[in-house]
C-alpha cells in the first residue's frame, strides 16, 4: 500500500464541514423521528427462491433480512428478490463484505478491496440498507485480529483512504458502505466513528452499529445503556443497520473476560437499545452468530419481550 498523506489543513477543513453537517443531522433526527412504528427484527434464513424466502421470514415474524444472493447473480434474480421483499414490506438490511482491505500482504489487500467493491455494488443493485465490513487489521495472521498498529493515526488514515476508494469506485446512491466497530480497530467508539465520518466525508458512508463490540471493559459493561444512548446521540442519522447480540462478563476469574452470548444471557441494556432504535424504526436489528434456529427463536423472544415491556412492538 502506498503511504497515505492527508494535509492537516485539508483534514481540519473537511472535519469542520462534516461536523457541522453531522450536528445538523443529529438535530433533525431527534426532532423528526418519534417512537410508534413497529421495529424491524431479522435473522438468517435459507434462501431457496424469492417466494419461499419471504415465507420463511414471515413465519419467524421477521421484517428485515440479510441479503439472500451473491454478487455473481443475474440482475433478473436480484430484481426478483428485491421485488419480493418490497411487496412483503421486508427491508434487506445488509450485504457483508467481510475481508481485510488494509492487510499488510498486498495480494490479500487487493483481493479484499475487490471484494468490498463487488459487495457494495451488490448492495446498490438490490437496494440493501448498507454494505458492511470491519475496517481491517494490520495483523498478518488474523484478518480482523488485534495488532499494535491498529489504533494509530497512520492506520486511521489508511482506513480513510481505503474507504473513500471503495465508495468512489462504486458511487452508491441507494446504499452506503459502513464499518462495524471492533474493540481493537477503528471505529472503536462513538467518538472515533464520528471522526471517521468527518474524515471520509462521503455521502456513501454510513454507520453499522453493533454495541456489543464496544463493550471493552467492566466500566462499559455495567453502563451499556449510557454507551448505547451516546452512540445514537452522536451517530443516529447515519445508522443504517444494527446487530443484536449480548455480552457476559465472567465473574469467577481475576482478570476481565468478556464472552459473546445469546441476547438475554448477558448484560447489554436492551431496553436502552430498543428505546433508541424506536426513534428510527426502519433501521433493522439483525441477530447473528447463533448455532441454530432454536437459539434464534430464544433470542427473538427475549428481544420482543423487552420491547413489549418498554411499550414497543416488532409487528
Image (cartoon, rainbow, N blue to C red):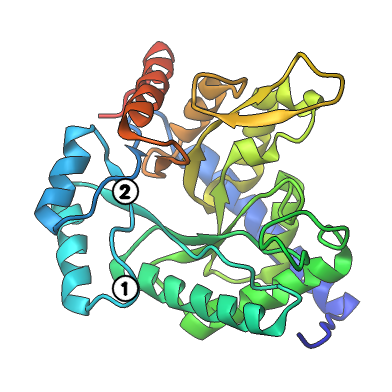
- Residue 200 percent across, percent down from the top left: 68, 70
Which residue of the protein is positioned furthest toward the top in this rendering?
309
Q: Nearer the viewer, residue 142 or 54?
A: 142
Residue labelled with disc 1: 125
* Pointers 2 and 1 in contact (C-beta within 8 Å): no
- Left or right of 11: which side holds 236? left
Q: Residues within 10 Å of mark 1 (few under 14, many from 20)?
A: some
- Residue 118 percent across, percent down from the top left: 44, 77
Closer to the chain start, of discs 2 and 1, is 2
Secondary element type, mark 2: strand
- Left or right of 294: which side holds 95? right
Which residue of the protein is positioned furthest toward the left in this rendering?
51
Q: Residues within 10 Å of mark 2 (few under 14, many from 20)?
A: many
Up-down: is 148 above or below 295?
A: below
- Quarter of the figure that contains the N terminus: bottom right
Up-down: is 111 above or below 197?
A: below
Q: Residue at x 83, y 80 (%)?
A: 6
Q: Nearer the viewer, residue 118 or 92?
A: 118
- Left or right of 169: which side holds 158? right
Question: Can residue 181 be seen in this snapshot?
Answer: yes
Indicate which label's residue lies in the foreground, 2 or 1.
2
Question: On the image, which quarter does residue 99 sit in?
Answer: bottom right
Alpha carbon distance from label 2 to label 1 = 16 Å
Q: Residue at x 24, y 47 (%)?
A: 90
Residue labelled with disc 2: 65
Secondary element type, mark 1: helix
Give the number of marks. 2
- Quarter of the figure that contains the C terminus: top left
Amino acid at each position: 500500500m502506498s503511504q497515505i498523506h492527508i494535509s492537516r489543513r485539508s483534514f481540519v477543513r473537511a472535519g469542520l464541514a462534516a461536523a457541522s453537517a453531522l450536528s445538523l443531522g443529529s438535530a433533525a433526527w431527534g426532532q423528526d423521528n418519534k417512537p410508534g412504528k413497529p421495529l424491524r427484527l431479522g435473522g438468517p434464513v435459507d434462501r431457496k427462491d424469492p417466494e419461499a424466502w419471504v415465507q420463511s421470514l414471515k413465519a419467524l415474524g421477521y421484517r428485515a433480512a440479510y441479503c439472500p444472493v451473491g454478487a455473481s447473480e443475474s440482475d433478473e434474480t436480484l430484481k426478483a428478490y428485491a421485488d419480493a421483499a418490497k411487496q412483503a414490506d421486508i427491508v434487506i438490511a445488509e450485504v457483508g463484505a467481510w475481508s481485510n482491505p488494509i492487510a499488510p500482504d498486498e495480494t490479500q489487500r487487493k483481493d479484499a478491496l475487490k471484494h468490498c467493491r463487488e459487495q457494495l455494488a451488490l448492495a446498490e443493485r438490490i437496494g440493501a440498507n448498507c454494505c458492511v465490513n470491519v475496517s481491517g487489521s494490520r495483523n498478518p495472521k488474523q484478518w480482523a485480529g488485534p495488532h499494535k498498529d491498529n489504533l494509530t493515526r497512520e492506520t486511521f488514515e489508511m482506513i480513510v483512504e481505503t474507504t473513500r476508494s471503495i465508495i468512489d469506485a462504486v458511487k452508491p446512491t441507494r446504499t452506503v458502505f459502513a464499518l462495524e466497530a471492533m474493540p481493537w480497530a477503528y471505529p472503536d467508539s462513538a467518538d472515533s466513528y464520528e471522526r471517521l465520518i468527518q474524515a471520509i466525508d462521503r455521502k456513501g458512508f454510513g454507520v453499522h452499529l453493533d454495541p456489543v463490540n464496544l463493550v471493552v471493559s467492566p466500566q462499559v459493561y455495567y453502563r451499556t445503556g449510557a454507551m448505547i444512548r451516546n452512540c445514537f446521540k452522536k451517530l443516529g442519522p447515519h445508522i443504517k443497520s444494527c446487530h443484536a447480540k449480548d455480552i457476559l462478563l465472567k465473574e469467577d476469574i481475576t482478570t476481565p473476560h468478556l464472552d459473546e452470548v445469546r441476547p438475554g444471557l448477558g448484560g447489554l441494556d436492551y431496553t436502552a437499545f430498543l428505546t433508541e432504535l424506536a426513534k428510527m424504526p426502519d433501521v433493522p436489528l439483525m441477530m447473528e452468530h447463533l448455532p441454530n434456529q432454536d437459539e434464534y427463536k430464544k433470542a427473538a423472544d427475549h428481544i420482543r419481550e423487552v420491547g413489549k415491556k418498554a411499550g414497543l412492538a416488532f409487528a
